[in-house]
């Protein structure tokens, strides 16, 4: 991982993972991967099932497509559905040494067929982006591979915030980033940019955007958020976030508010370290929570966790991603969020400091996460979660709750298909006018 230095001048050069700066440089390959196996890795039984699981949805028999799909899935496929991964290459059928090293198969399509993940996230640094027609063909090929191998369709996402974090910059309309939009003081601009961005993602076959950033950037030394946030005033940021969620939904694309419980008041980058924020619960409710409350009020599809410690919210010392008190206690119970919770990228240093990569995946699920994003070693993480379910450490009911949330999201956003791409529609005159107006 690249070392991050303070100051916004370094951010643009270090934009690399599912949440933004810091992970973009392709991480070193993990040992050769094999197909998921049922071997039970050593798992420390110190974390228990969250007692609040009863507040979460259960897979009751009904006529919904999501519930029918869940009922037909094997245990192994349910576990696989939790993972959203990176594949390397521009074409679904083109071989890559990175795929071979990490997954034991060469092409992106073979990775999807072998592991049957719930989602794939695209990156320019993984060689996924060279042109609009190429991206559309890649997403189509990946979805076809998923249809050949499993019951559930593949959700394809991207980290397209605009501004500094623009994974599709070379092929989509160039829109201003959040801080520039925030300076206009017009939430309608946030809505229009999100809608136009979402429309272009749909034309590429992408159904989920890991945006908007809901952090309130109150620390001028913040090395990871900075201009990615709409501003430093909680109320104004909340209005922008709510409008952006509306815009993505108008385009038919799922939106992800990030990074819960709030990454705005830190001088440490969670890609390379573990930030600690000393906000009291009262301060958190006043400063960090309002944009997330607003996102939830606007029906945001998913919320991404942050790899940071807030000791006054959870004195355990665990990052929020692994904290039942934060993900279940605050997000599910206090804020009333019943949608999908995604981890931030699990290959980031902030979440890997205390536990091994296998244990991190298990603890994230126990904390309340549904999507396990970008595990550094997919077979190891998959086997650990599968073993935890077989041993009863993670109950099958808890697993079903996460899978059902993911499937419901896919059903709501049309991922069960058919999905038609139209790469020629990008950079339309209407979208260019929006970009020009907002600047």
Image (spheres, rainbow, N blue to C red):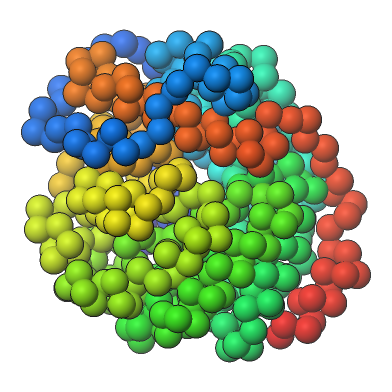
Q: Residue at x 64, y 62 (%)?
A: 246
Q: Is residue 399 above or below residue 225?
A: above
| Depth order, front residue of 39/190 | 190
Q: Residue at x 54, y 54 (%)?
A: 299
Q: Is residue 433 above or below residue 130?
A: below
Q: Could you tell me residue 285's position as x and y percent?
A: 29, 71
Q: Is residue 186 left or right of residue 405?
A: right
| Quarter the C terminus occupies | bottom right
Q: Is residue 361 left or right of residue 131?
A: left
Q: Classify residue 197 by image quadrant.
A: bottom right
Q: Residue at x 76, y 76 (%)?
A: 435
Q: Residue at x 67, y 34 (%)?
A: 415
Res 110 visible: no
Q: Could you tell me residue 52's position as x and y percent?
A: 24, 39
Q: Is residue 349 above or below residue 176?
A: above
Q: Could you tell me residue 88's position as x and y percent?
A: 58, 38
């Amino acid at each position: 991982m690249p070392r991050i230095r303070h100051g916004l001048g370094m951010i643009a050069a270090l934009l690399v993972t599912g949440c933004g700066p810091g992970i973009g440089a392709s991480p070193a390959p993990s040992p050769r991967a094999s197909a998921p196996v049922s071997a039970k890795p050593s798992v420390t039984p110190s974390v228990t099932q969250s007692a609040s699981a009863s507040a979460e949805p259960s897979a009751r028999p009904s006529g919904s497509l999501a519930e029918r799909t869940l009922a037909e899935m094997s245990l192994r496929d349910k576990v696989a559905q939790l993972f959203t991964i990176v594949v390397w290459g521009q074409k679904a059928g083109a071989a890559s040494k990175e795929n071979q090293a990490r997954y034991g198969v060469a092409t992106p399509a073979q990775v999807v067929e072998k592991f049957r993940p719930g989602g794939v996230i695209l990156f320019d640094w993984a060689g996924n982006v060279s042109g609009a027609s190429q991206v559309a063909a890649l997403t189509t090929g990946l979805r076809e591979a998923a249809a050949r191998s499993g019951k559930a369709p593949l959700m394809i996402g991207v980290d397209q915030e605009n501004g500094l974090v623009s994974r599709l910059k070379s092929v989509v309309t160039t829109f201003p980033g959040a801080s520039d939009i925030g300076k206009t003081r017009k939430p309608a601009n946030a809505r229009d940019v999100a809608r136009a961005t979402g429309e272009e993602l749909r034309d590429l076959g992408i159904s989920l955007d890991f945006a908007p950033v809901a952090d309130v950037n109150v620390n001028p030394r913040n090395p990871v958020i900075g201009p990615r946030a709409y501003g430093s005033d909680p109320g104004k940021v909340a209005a922008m976030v709510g409008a952006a969620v509306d815009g993505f939904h108008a385009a038919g694309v799922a939106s992800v508010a990030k990074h819960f419980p709030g990454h705005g008041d830190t001088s440490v980058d969670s890609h390379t370290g573990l930030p600690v924020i000393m906000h009291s619960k009262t301060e958190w409710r006043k400063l960090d929570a309002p944009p997330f409350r607003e996102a939830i009020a606007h029906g945001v599809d998913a919320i991404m966790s942050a790899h940071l410690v807030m000791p006054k919210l959870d004195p355990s010392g665990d990052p929020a991603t692994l904290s039942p008190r934060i993900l279940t206690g605050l997000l599910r119970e206090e804020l009333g969020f019943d949608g999908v919770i995604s981890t931030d990228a699990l290959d980031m240093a902030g979440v890997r400091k205390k536990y091994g990569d296998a244990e991190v995946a298990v603890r994230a699920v126990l904390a309340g996460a549904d999507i396990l994003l970008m595990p550094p070693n997919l077979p190891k993480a998959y086997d650990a979660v599968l073993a935890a379910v077989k041993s009863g450490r993670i109950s099958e009911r808890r697993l079903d709750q996460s899978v059902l949330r993911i499937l419901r999201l896919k059903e709501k956003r049309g991922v069960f298909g058919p999905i038609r791409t139209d790469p020629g529609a990008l950079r339309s005159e209407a979208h260019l006018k929006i970009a020009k107006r907002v600047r």
